[in-house]
Image (tube, rainbow, N blue to C red):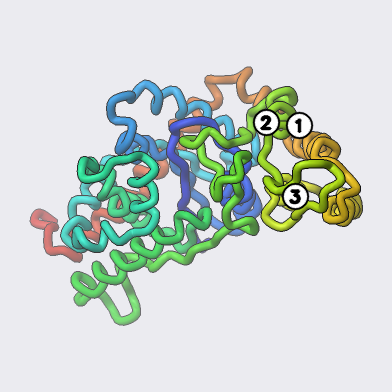
């Protein structure tokens, strides 16, 4: 049997280039080799959008279209909606007993997101505890591999801890070598974290520094021409810094092999002060639009057929729910909660 992948995204807005290099590219590449499940994490999105559920609902369709447009194939990958798998909520309740408050507060991803959102001491319990819910999402499908961006590594590490503790506590009656849950491996994309157009260390919907996979040619041009570059460079004749410069990071990430010679020439000229930011940015616009054109075309085709997209989500959710039901039978047996078997 194929090993299983489980991954997903919060439907709080359209997906962007950071999502692509962080995990979407790997999902497309691995869907032939693995039994892959991709989740639209609407429950998780509500942890900091609880006052605006319509926003989350509207973005289910947008993110599903992003998945399909980048090449995630519904005949190879199961795409499903988190809130429609009630077994995950039950497993989350059991997992809550396996994690301390202090451990949740030490999670670096949670700490950083709390800081960004300004929660302070008023953090909702659902938000603070979402690493536990995320562990339930991953483990209820018994995932062996989780492709994520670098910022999500601590979340999967916590999932591994929970799986280990559950197996230790409740796996004693299983045959030797068998465990209820695997400890999933982590796969970080080739570009672990894509910087934002503003030079921020992370491209993020909440920071408004993204280039979306669905952006038009005009939107891409506008965002690229306004990109942060080398702040110390005042004139085009000033020697510039290539390392850490978002424009060159994007050229390296999205340029093809055929672009590499030109990119290397730009880098050399930039360091010597022989080329301006505008010229390099114009080339980046060409590179990004060439990369996005086939994605835009596939999206347009799926947008013409919303009934097909809905059917893909219905069938995927039905399949995921069936897998979750099987896991919960094992969980309840291991925890001695199978009273009527």
Q: Nearer the viewer, residue 223 or 4?
A: 223
Disc 1 crowd rating (10 Å Cα; few below 14, some 14-19, many 20+) is: some
In three-dimensional space, the C-alpha distance between marks 3 and 1, rounded to whole angstroms, equals: 21 Å
9 sits left or right of 111 in the view? right
Q: Are marks 2 and 3 in contact (CB under 8 Å)?
A: no
Residue 293, numbered label: 1
x then y, percent, for residue 202: 54, 47
Between marks 3 and 1 in the image, the one whose residue lies nearer the viewer:
3
Q: Residue at x 19, y 58 (%)?
A: 101
Disc 3 crowd rating (10 Å Cα; few below 14, some 14-19, many 20+) is: many
In three-dimensional space, the C-alpha distance between marks 2 and 3, rounded to whole angstroms, equals: 15 Å
Q: Is residue 275 above or below residue 335?
A: above
Q: Residue at x 61, y 53 (%)?
A: 26
Question: Which callout, 3 or 1, points at the residue further toward the start of the chain?
Answer: 3
User: Circle 2 sits on which residue?
Assistant: 223
- Could you tell me which quadrant the C terminus lies in? bottom left
User: Circle 3 sits on which residue?
Assistant: 248
x then y, percent, for residue 25: 64, 49
Q: Quadrant of residue 275?
A: top right
x then y, percent, for residue 85: 32, 40
Name of the residue lying farthest toward the top: 304
């Amino acid at each position: 049997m194929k090993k299983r992948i489980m991954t997903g995204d919060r439907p709080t807005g359209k997906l962007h280039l950071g999502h692509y290099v962080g995990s979407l590219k790997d999902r497309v590449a691995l869907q032939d080799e693995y039994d892959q499940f991709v989740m639209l994490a609407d429950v998780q999105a509500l942890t900091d959008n609880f006052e605006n559920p319509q926003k989350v609902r509207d973005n289910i369709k947008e993110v599903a279209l992003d998945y399909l447009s980048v090449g995630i194939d519904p005949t190879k990958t199961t795409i499903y909606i988190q809130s429609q798998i009630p077994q995950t909520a039950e497993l989350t309740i059991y997992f809550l007993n396996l994690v301390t408050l202090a451990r949740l507060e030490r999670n670096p991803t949670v700490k950083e997101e709390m800081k960004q959102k300004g929660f302070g001491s008023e953090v909702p319990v659902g938000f603070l505890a979402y690493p536990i819910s995320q562990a339930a999402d991953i483990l209820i499908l018994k995932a062996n591999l989780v492709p994520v961006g670098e910022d999500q590594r601590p979340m999967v590490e916590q999932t591994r801890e929970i799986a280990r503790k559950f197996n230790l506590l409740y796996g004693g009656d299983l045959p030797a070598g068998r465990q209820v849950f695997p400890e999933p491996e982590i796969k970080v994309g080739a570009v672990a974290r894509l910087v934002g157009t503003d030079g921020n260390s992370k491209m993020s919907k909440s920071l408004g520094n993204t280039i979306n996979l669905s952006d038009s040619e005009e939107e891409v041009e506008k965002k690229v021409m306004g990109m942060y570059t080398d702040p110390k460079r005042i004139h085009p004749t000033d020697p510039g810094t290539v390392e850490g410069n978002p424009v060159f990071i994007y050229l390296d990430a999205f340029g093809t092999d055929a672009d590499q010679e030109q990119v290397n020439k730009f880098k050399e000229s930039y360091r010597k002060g022989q080329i301006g930011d505008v010229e390099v940015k114009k080339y980046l616009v060409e590179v990004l639009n060439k990369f996005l054109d086939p994605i835009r075309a596939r999206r347009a085709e799926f947008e013409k057929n919303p009934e097909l997209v809905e059917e893909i989500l219905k069938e995927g959710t039905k399949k995921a729910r069936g897998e979750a039901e099987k896991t919960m039978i094992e969980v309840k047996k291991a925890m001695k909660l199978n009273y009527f078997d």
